[in-house]
Image (tube, helix red, strand yellow):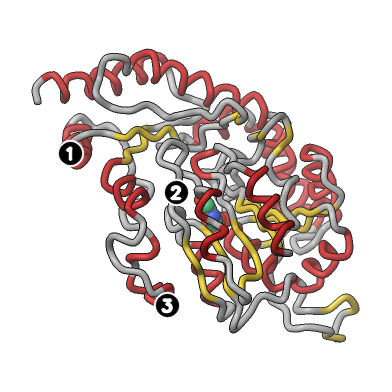
Amino acid sequence: MVDVVGQYHKIKPDVDAAIHKILDSGQFILGKEVGEFECQIAGYLGVTYAVGCASGTDALQVAMMALDIGPGDEVITTPFTFVATTETIVLLGAKPVYVDIDPKTFNIDPTQIESVITSKTKAIIPVHLYGQAADMDPILEIARKHNLKVIEDSAQALGASYKGRKVCTFGDLSCISYFPSKNLGAFGDAGMVVTNDVALGEKVRMICAHGSKVRYYHETLGVNSRLDTLQAVILSVKLKYLDSWNAARRAAAKRYNELLKGTPATIPFVAPECDHIFHQYTLRAPKRNELAEHLKQKGIPHAIYYPVPLHLQKAFAVAGKQKGAFPVTEQAADEVLSLPIHTELTEEQLVYITDAIKEFYRTL
Ligand SMILES: *Cc1c(COP(=O)(O)O)cnc(C)c1O
């Protein structure tokens, strides 16, 4: 699905030099390079504050902790996303309240948000799924009207924009994942919280450091979540390429679209106000499971993001929803299929993959 080794080899001298510098310095934990990378990301996004942490999952958790979300609170989000978004809500003792998705973008449907707001609702977490921004204007408007916080889950969308403005700049807080397969990927786990609210950013930093600003004096309940210096320097080298890599993904997606013309598969919808960065290239495919089997026979990697909506997961029965509660999400879970997309895809690979799909639908 991705080619992390191929990408590494293209930038190997710079990455290796950066790593060796840290090995020689011994500053593995919170070296000055972590702060430098935080500044680079803040500059790239145009936000005022960035806090590195250990993963995108931790970023979601500490962001909610900074907003004092806990038992008795409700957080509105989408059931069609990676588990981390819901898991962290439940871990903090709050309740995830789901809203169905838009059938075209797969993102939370803003028109259904207001009907689930209660006196317990604290925040909305839109997820920019597959690399395309959620419809932020109506979400922000609803949040303002009801005095709710907004946390963007930008794990899949670093560099994407909405109406010309980058994601990560809309919410009170925004969460980034640098998991190796993300568009900007570390060589291990890493994450970040960004914000334009300096006080809130400092609170996040304190929570990430065991709830302390001064070592051994703990003001609040915190966690241990840090961005390794090694990951920071690797990410710093890679950040220079992020826009061109996102463009390469967009070009591959465009080529997939052309090559898949005439097949019954529905190609990804790109909303006119969005600059999609194609973290995933996801089709709606008739006979999805049979197509997946056919691709497997042909040795073509593929994935289903996500086969089971979160409201139907045993672990999240707390949400109290049964099958049929979110029909658009449930249908998407039965139909989606993601194809390999990364910066190293060749024309030959694109043709091979799409030929296999065409062959499958011809022989159906
Ligand atoms: C990857 C991802 C996360 C979690 O990131 P990790 O760094 O793997 O913890 C959260 N939300 C979404 C939507 C993701 O895709």
Q: What SS does tag 2 mark? A: loop
The residue carrying pointer 3 sits among few (fewer than 14), some (14 to 19) or many (20 or more) residues within 10 Å by Cα, namely: some
Question: Residue at left 80%, top 50%?
Answer: 38
Counting other residues with Cα less than 10 Å from the Cα at mark 2, is it few (<14), some (14-19), or many (20 or more)?
many
* Horizontal relation, residue 250 to residue 330: left or right: right
Marked residue nearer the N-terminal end (2 or 3): 2
In depth, the one of 145 and 166 nearer the eye is: 145
Residue 101 has which mark?
Answer: 2
Query: Which one is in front in this view, the residue at disc 1 or the one at disc 2?
Result: 2
Tell me the SS state at disc 3.
helix
**Residue linked to disc 1:** 293
Quadrant location of the C terminus in the rendered image: top left
Q: Earlier in the sequence, mark 1 or mark 2?
A: 2
Q: Ligand 1 falls in which quarter?
A: bottom right
Looking at numbered disc 3 in the image, what kind of residue is underneath it? Val
Q: Residue furthest left?
A: 363
Q: In the displayed structure, would residue 15 be above or below residue 227?
A: above
Which mark identifies residue 318? Answer: 3
Looking at numbered disc 1 in the image, what kind of residue is underneath it?
Answer: Glu
Labels 3 and 1: the sequence-earlier one: 1
